[in-house]
Image (cartoon, helix red, strand yellow):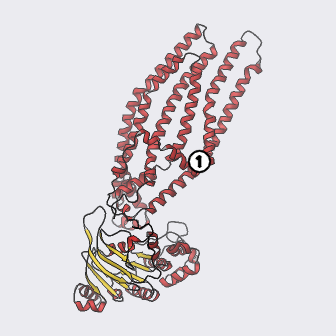
Amino acid sequence: MASSTFNIFDTLKTKSVLEVFALIPRVFGFMWRSAPLLVAGTSALRIVEAVTPALTLWLMKVVVDRIVASLGSPVDWSYVLMPILVVTALRLGNSLVSQINNIWGHILTERVYSAAHSQLLAKAASLDIAFFEAPQFYDRLTQAKRNVNRIQSVVWGVPSFLQQFLSLSAVFGLLTILHPLAVVLLICATLPRIYYEGFTARRRFDMETEMMRNYRSSDYYGDLPTQREKIKEIRVFGLRQFLVDRFYKFRDTIVRAIIKLNIRFLKLDISINNLPTIAIAMVWAYAVYRTAMGEVSVGTLTMVVAAAHQAVSSLQGLISSGGNLFQNTLFITRFFELLDLDPKSVRGSLEPPRSKSPAKIPSPIRTGLELRNVSFTYPGTTIEILKDVSFSIPVGTKLAIVGENGAGKTTLIKLLVRFYDPTSGSIALDRTDYRDYDLSDIRANVSAVFQDFVRYQISASDNIGVGNVGHLANRDAIVEAAKKAGADEFVTKLPKGYETILGKTFDEGVDLSGGEWQNLAIARAFMSESQILFLDEPTAALDAFGEAALYERFARLTENKTVIFISHRFSTVRMADTIVVLEDGRVIEQGDHETLMKLDGKYRLMFSTQAARYA
């Protein structure tokens, strides 16, 4: 078992500016792999958009100067109006370019969203169960999902930044006609905004990180009244106002934090916004003075007046683009941190095979399973759930695990399925330690039905077929599995038979009873080609007769499989070859039904107590 403990505060330390911007090439690489032609096309169009404003200003200067030069003499209208026609063509072309860019950008957004979420899903599916026991992991996952769309913002941000830079350079070039110091003055007046953009980006990022638990809590309370399986209890106990109040409580905390932060931003923004206005006025005054002295033309004055304002606007836009780029890249670190998450960074994660050439599980299994002094404590807790557990499960055995609630039965199943490794001791299959097998090989050779099985809102056929996704299209195998589980009888009566969509999430969905859903879950287990079958109270929704009939089918249809099951009905348990009795995480009795009844211990007491209910 990995010794390190998952700590979000160790792995989510605030990044420096250089660390953040160093991520940009990776973001571009991700975008390029998602949609290379769209990235190239949109970047090229932004460069076209960048040079248009400065070119327009220059042409307007030409128009004014030509008009002034024509005063008092015949006007050559083609000479005067030609620049206006060019400006009009530029504006029309720029509008078309902008529309094309918007369309391509929308498509690119969808492509990136699909690619990013696919990677998030793949990463989450690859992590051990132990990660899903850590609330900090959900904080990280939620923040990564919330900010996936910022990937495109980063990629848009770089061309936008370059566009602003090119546009600003062109405008500054025009201002040098008046005086180079005009450019220096405007730059100095706008520089404080760099601090503002960096400060606000960092604080927004920090605030979302600090508020993430509030975001998750508000989402939880907000989702409860919208979940079909929760509605009945919410109505019975009159929880509507309680849930609304809790939702509002967490949202109010978030809103108050946002308001407080933005008031702080506003004060800072006002204090730095006056300097550029003063600088523009100084440039205008100097331009008017030089025009009055006859040192520059009226066209140049017109151009300088517009260029000074546009220079400040472009400079602020450049700094704002840089700030947005920094902020978006800062938020995207969460997405890439999740993708880079070390599978061994949480206590309780599974150990990799101890050999470069993992052992292969034999087919058929020859001897069976053996637990050797197994103890287990869940990650993040100190309570020992299993304590020095030892017993064997010979191949082909039907073994039942019984005990009171909290005795450790389900935990034992989790270890045998290898969701976790023992804290101490070992589990062996055919005398080879579980950790010496490749995990995928173990998964291919075991199947399980849990009490909290999933009710997939998909077709009945797919509900069964996912038990062996390689045979989803094999209708004969699916029908055979349904018959073994007793599900074929009711599935064939559905409106579209095996193609009927189940549940109430989608249109035309048909809901099933609890027992029918369980039969489908059990049919999934029959789809598997595994050699070992685990059943963790899979028949809880069936009545005593239904459970007995099902287990009789199990016994008949799994003759060549090893079956380990948990059940609270002793009429079923007595059919097992071997019964293991757990109490407080320890094995206190084991044997077949007759042997345990003769012991006159815990098993006999539980059996007699349950039998008395039916007397």
User: What residue is pinned by disc 1?
Assistant: 106
Quarter where residue 343 is shown: bottom left
Question: Horizontal placement of 371 versus 279: left or right?
Answer: left
Q: Is residue 63 visible?
A: yes
User: Viewer-proximal residue, 379 or 481?
Assistant: 379
Label total for image: 1
Question: Horizontal placement of 148 versus 420: left or right?
Answer: right
Q: Residue at x 53, y 50 (%)?
A: 30
Kindly state the secondary structure of the residue where label 1 is placed: helix
Q: Position of residue 374 (x, y in %)?
A: 29, 74
Q: Is residue 110 visible?
A: no
Relative to 313, say whether 152 is above or below. below
Relative to 580, say whether 106 is above or below. above
Quarter where residue 64 is shown: top right
The amino acid on which the numbered mark 1 sits, given as a three-letter code, is His
Q: Quadrant of the N terminus?
A: bottom left
Q: Residue at x 33, y 74 (%)?
A: 412
Task: Residue lying at the far left in this picture: please name it.
Answer: 600
Task: Residue lying at the far front in this picture: please name it.
Answer: 356
Question: Horizontal placement of 582 versus 300: left or right?
Answer: left
User: Viewer-proximal residue, 75 or 589?
Assistant: 589
Q: Position of residue 83 (x, y in %)?
A: 71, 24
Dot 1, how many residues are within 10 Å of its Cα: few (below 14), some (14-19), or many (20+)? Answer: few
Q: Position of residue 107 (x, y in %)?
A: 60, 49
Q: Position of residue 376 (x, y in %)?
A: 29, 69
Q: Quadrant of the C terminus?
A: bottom left
User: Viewer-proximal residue, 235 or 597?
Assistant: 597
